[in-house]
Image (tube, rainbow, N blue to C red):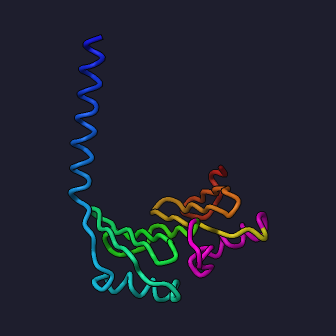
Amino acid sequence: MKNVQKITAATLLFALVLTMTVSCHAQSITPENIDSTAASFIRTYFPDVTVLLIIKERYDYDVTLSDNTKIDFDRNMDWEEVDCSHASYYTEVPSALIPGKVSQYLQQYYAGRHVVKLSKSNRKWEVELDNDLEIHFDKDFKVIEID
């Protein structure tokens, strides 16, 4: 029983230290000081809302817009994720951000559905539709998973 208490205490202490370490690396940036690349992206694709909050975490930036759209940028200010799933104005990801082959696939198999979240990396793209269906594409835009 004492071993269980020791393990539990050690686990809680580790979690606390980890949380404090991660939170120490996050910093708030004022909307006026947003990088010009990110500002241009936001003006282009989300012109009718404003930047409310920018949090810099180690190597990436989490931006929250006034309609609750969330955009993640990497250290080079390339967007990695656009999440409109809880937004009040932009209730879907702008179609200009969705690659053509992904759009064609969605039109063919999910016509009438809207993309509410779009993520990209070097290896894959992830799309979330307004019915909570997630579709994963490889870098060549072939479907690799539907969840």
Q: Is residue 65 left or right of residue 104?
A: left
Given residues 36 and 92, the one toward you in this image is: 92
Q: Looking at the figure, which quarter contains the N terminus?
A: top left
The picture places residue 141, in percent across and down from the top left corner, at 61, 64
Badge count: 0
**Quadrant of res 111:** bottom right
The picture places residue 35, in percent across and down from the top left corner, at 31, 82
Q: Residue at x 71, y 59 (%)?
A: 131
Q: Is residue 57 above or below residue 69?
A: above
Q: Is residue 71 left or right of residue 126?
A: left
Report if residue 101 lies within the magenta region: yes
For the magenta stretch, what is the residue range?
86-110
Given residues 140 and 67, the one toward you in this image is: 67
The picture places residue 133, in percent across and down from the top left corner, at 67, 56
Q: Is residue 25 above or below residue 43?
A: above
Q: Is residue 77 above or below residue 119?
A: below
Q: Residue at x 53, y 88 (%)?
A: 48
The picture places residue 84, in percent across and down from the top left corner, at 56, 70
Report if residue 6 lies within the magenta region: no
Given residues 60 and 21, the one toward you in this image is: 21
Q: Residue at x 64, y 60 (%)?
A: 142
Q: Is residue 108 left or right of residue 27?
A: right
Q: Residue at x 30, y 86 (%)?
A: 32
